[in-house]
Amino acid sequence: MGKGLLVVALLAVVIYVTIRFFEKRRTARKPGMPRSPRRPPRRVIAPDDDADFLRDLEQKRRKERRERDEQHGDADSS
């Protein structure tokens, strides 16, 4: 009798946990709600990972190089 009662109690716990799991899953996302992404969007960790930063940096370098070349060109022609 003791083993039978233990089996029934264990079966009841398994059924309860299973029902709670599916119930929680169903209520977590109702129809019409957008799906949440599984991973958060990739965030920029370091400046060298940011394409915009690298592009701006290259533009600044080119501008400085042009200005320096123009200054040296003006000094040579005087």
Image: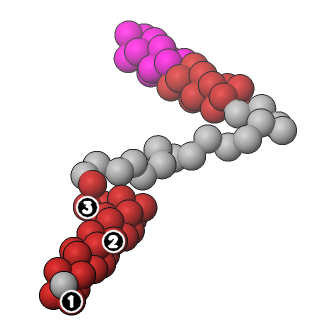
Q: Residue 19: x percent and y percent?
A: 63, 25
Residue receiving disc 2: 63
Q: Earlier in the sequence, mark 2 or mark 1?
A: 2
Q: What residue sits right under mark 1 in the picture?
A: 77
Secondary structure beneath label 2: helix
Residue 20 in sight from this viewpoint: yes
Residue at x-position 38% and y-position 10%: 2
Highlighted magenta segment, given as a residue range: 1-13
Residue 25 falls left or right of residue 30: left
Label 3 sits on what residue type? Asp
Quarter of the image where the N terminus is located? top left
Amino acid bearing label 2: Lys
The crowd level at tag 2 (other Cα within 10 Å; few <14, some 14-19, many 20+) is few
Q: Is residue 44 left or right of residue 4?
A: left
Q: Which of the two discs, 1 and 3, sits closer to the camera?
A: 1
Give the residue type that dot 1 points to.
Ser
Tell me the element at label 3.
helix
Assess disc 1: are there few (<14), some (14-19) or many (≥20) residues with their C-alpha within 10 Å of its C-alpha: few
Task: Categorize mark 3 by other alpha carbons within 10 Å: few (<14), some (14-19), many (20+).
Answer: few
Foreground disc of the pair 2, 3: 2
